[in-house]
Amino acid sequence: MTTAREEGLVTCRTCARVWPGMAEACGRCGARLSSRDALSLQRVWAWWIAGVACYIPANLYPMLVTETLTSRSESTIIGGAIDIAKHGDLGIALIVLIASVFIPVVKFIAIAYLGLSVKLRSQQTPVGRMHLFEVIEFIGRWSMIDVFVVAILSALVQLSVVASIQPGPAALAFALSVIFTMFSAKSFDPRLIWDYLPTRAGSRAP
């Protein structure tokens, strides 16, 4: 398999235009060109660790704080989903669990897998890893659904004397976790996936 790098070409990561390898800037969008981002993996792991560190308190501390005239209750992400399920809304509870637990955990695992596969110079399934990277980037923008729900509830249920809903400390931690995870995925240079693959002659790319 021949790569663009082996042909002396470089791809703009902003607009996908291909240029000769000696070009320093994209002639179409002006972005700086580089064949590979040498610090890509360092940034990936730095943002990844920050995302995991924020995701832990996001699940331990309350996401919602509900106050009425007679009571005050706090709900974590999982606790809130369980309460919703107890009220009979299994579909909504399932959506909350998928958006707040399943997808973030899968993203952490997927990013770690991509980073380790490049670090260990894996030669397996480059197309599959590219598809996995594209999926991670696609779902990243939808990962804030919990924070949006909390913000909407807080804005709508502000009856002051009767009841109020406030975002708990987990809301900020969850938002930071999502943002850091998105930065981690954005820092990954997918062109690294195609390095170290067997060439037609049976040797490996540098």
Image: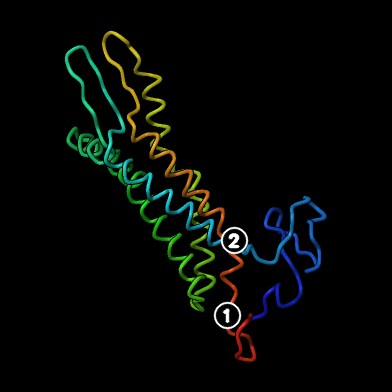
Instruction: Kindly identify the residue that appears in the image at 48 percent across and 65 percent down.
Output: 114
**186 left or right of 4?**
left
Residue 88, compared with residue 54, is above or below; it is above
**Closer-to-camera residue (140/59):** 59
Q: CA distance from mark 1 to mark 2?
A: 21 Å
**Sequence-wise, which precedes: disc 1 or disc 2?**
2
Could you tell me if the residues under marks 1 and 2 are in contact, i.e. CB atoms within 8 Å?
no
Task: Give the quarter of the figure containing the C terminus.
Answer: bottom right
Badge 2 is on which residue?
39
Q: Quadrant of residue 57?
A: top left
Q: Amino acid at mark 2?
A: Leu
Task: Give the quarter of the figure containing the N terminus.
Answer: bottom right
Q: Position of residue 100 (x, y in %)?
A: 35, 44
Badge 1 is on which residue?
197
What colour scheme has been applied to the protein in the rendered image? rainbow
Instruction: Kindly identify the residue that appears in the image at 25 percent across and 41 percent down.
Output: 78
Q: Residue furthest bottom?
A: 201
Q: Position of residue 89 (x, y in %)?
A: 24, 36
Instruction: Kindly identify the residue that appears in the image at 61 percent across and 89 percent down.
Output: 203
Q: Residues within 10 Å of mark 1 (few under 14, many from 20)?
A: many
Q: Position of residue 34 (x, y in %)?
A: 71, 62
Q: Residues within 10 Å of mark 2 (few under 14, many from 20)?
A: few
